[in-house]
Every structure is written in structure tokens, then in C-alpha cells.
Amino acid sequence: MEIENAVINIMNREINSAVFSQKELDTTDEIVIEYIEKLVKKFLNSECLTFEIEESEPAQYLISKEDSFIKIAESMTQYYFEAIKTWAEIPEGDLLFFRVNDEIGNEYAGMIKLDYTAKYIHLIDYDDDNVVTNKIGKNKAILPAPTQGASCGIIIKNKQACFVHEKTYQDVQGTWSFVEKILELKQKKTKVSENVAKVKKSLKSVSKKYDIEEYEAVMDAQKAIYKSIDEDSSINNEQLAQQVFGDNVQAKQDFMEDLDKKGVAPKIAVDANAPVFERKYQKQKLKLDNGIEIVVPVDLLKNRDYIEFKNNTDGSLSVIIKNIENIKNNF
């Protein structure tokens, strides 16, 4: 990853002001390179809200050429600070701005808030007799590890697609949202995972209504979701209904109607987050009531040559794992 520009600005409530850097970070510094590279990769490899840049004027300003990079960072920092300075629930932090290119030519521009964390540190001091005295202190302005993830921020890919992490805060003033207060988006955005949670809830309720074993419904659904994401970068709920309920027309209809009531579209686009959800659904973790847990690749879930679920005459269930050549114990 090549860093073209980077600057960090401080937002400090104690002095009721933002502190602007008048000079960019040294983009040849190994610490700067490592921190930004890990931060960007962590950001993009986690689920993001997505939208097109035309929906947000502040996002458009981040990549504009009307001002210098330093000026854009200063203006956005001042704007951000004014939006949070009276909200005690929002932690203090720095704003990191950057423009980078990846190995295959994609351009990224970003603004990420780095929330402070407090850490205990040692201090070297001298007493009145000039004797060294080691002490314990507390630094309240430690930047988060780059692999920790950002609470709020935006990365713009190729000047078009926007990826956002956001956190909402509550206090007596109401609700503060990064998407609304900073990016000024008018239309509410919903995470893919929030829609998937609604799909799962509908799936379980309809399956119960039609006496379909929940574990079977979930396995069929996960396989359908994984296939749909792999083939079309979306979750097609009609295909999911077909996979789970088969020829049961009424169950499929109830499922789709329940999703409609919950405001879930028949097709959920996950193109921007496809790698995240492919990783999530390529395996399924089965938890048995006797404490045993099994992780099964989705391709093998319905393959009876490798795993079989058998109903016993006493009403219990057996899980049979087959064709095992060796077992490794990761002690």
C-alpha cells in the first residue's frame, strides 16, 4: 500500500478547541506506514455501511480538489469538533485523514476517528535532591491499536463507493449519529447483518409454524445464503425460501410476507461486504445440548457421506460424522 497523503488532527475539549497539524505525516516513516495500512485493512475487512458518494456533500468534499489536503483535513476536523464538543458521551480522539493506493491500483481516501484509551505508564522523575524517582502515571490520550477497529469513519474507494463505520451515542440531547451529523445522509442506512438478523427471525418462526426442525432450516438457509453471495453478491430471500421450504407454497408465502412486514427487501445487496459475509457463512458452528460443538464447512452440511443427522426412536437426535482419516488435537 502506497500512502500519498496523511495528517492527524487533535480534538481537545479541555481547551475547547481542535489542534490542527500544519504539516503532513511523513509517509516514509515505517510507523506511519504500518499504522495506516493495518487500520485501512481492518476497516475494509469488517462489515461497513455503504452508499454512493453523491448522497453525502461532506464525503464529496473529502476527495475534492477545491482545497489542499491540509485545508480539507482542517475544515473537516473543525466541523467534526463542533458537532461533538457538547456531547460528553462521545470520547475524545484524533482525526486521521489519508489518501492511499493499493497494490492493484484502487484509490482510497479516508477520515477515521481514533478514540483515546487510557493506559498506565511509568514516569522518571527527580526529587528536590535530584534523586531519580520512578513513578506510575496515566496517559489518557493513547491511540487505539490499528487492529482494534474504528468506532466512526469513512473510506471512499475510487472516488465513488463509500464505506462507513459508525456508532450512535445517547444523552439528554438525544441521539448522535456519525452518518447523520457528520456525513449528513438523509436516508437511513441499514447494515446487512441487521437485515440478516430479521431474515433468521422470520425463518425460525415460519419453520416452527410448519414443524420444520430448526437446525435443518438454519443449515439449508446458510447454504443458500453462501451460494447466493458467491454467485450474485446478494442474499436472495426467494431462493432461500425455496431451499428451506421446498414445495410448501404456503410456508414460502408466509416467510416472504413476514420479511415484507419487517421492511426487508426480497434481495439484499452485499456486494461491498461480500468477502466479509463469505467468510462468515462458509462454515457453520453446531452447538449440541451435551456441550459438544462442531464446525462444518457449508459445502458438507447436507452431504450424508460426511455428516448425517439421525432421528432416534426416543425422540433424540444423533449426529454421525463419517469418512474421517485422522484427528488433530490442537492442544
Image: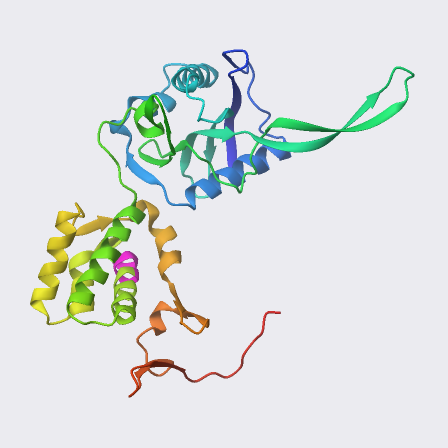
189 relative position to 299: left or right: left
Q: Which residue is at a point 33% across and 51% down the rendered structure image?
A: 274
Residue 307 position (above or below residue 225): below
- For the point 53% across and 23% down, the residue is 8
Question: Is 230 part of what is drawn in magenta?
Answer: yes
Could you tell me what secondary structure mostly forms the magenta stretch? helix
Query: Image check: 167 left or right of 18?
Result: left
How are the residues colored? rainbow
Q: Position of residue 11 (x, y in %)?
A: 50, 19
Which quadrant would residue 81 be assigned to in this image? top left
- Which residue reaches farthest bottom? 313
Q: Position of residue 240 (x, y in %)?
A: 20, 62
Q: Residue 256 versus residue 316: which sits nearer the camera?
A: 316
User: Looking at the picture, does residue 64 appear above or below residue 310?
Assistant: above
Give the residues drawn in magenta, as a range: 226-231
The C terminus, quarter of image: bottom right
Residue nearer the viewer, 260 or 53: 260
Where residue 236 sits in the image (x, y, percent)? 20, 56
Count of numbered badges drawn on the protein:
0
Where, by quadrant of the figure, is residue 209 drawn? bottom left
Q: Is residue 31 left or right of residue 237?
A: right
Question: At 90% across and 22% down in the image, what residue appears?
Answer: 131
Residue 100 is a magenta residue: no
Q: Nearer the viewer, residue 128 or 297?
A: 128
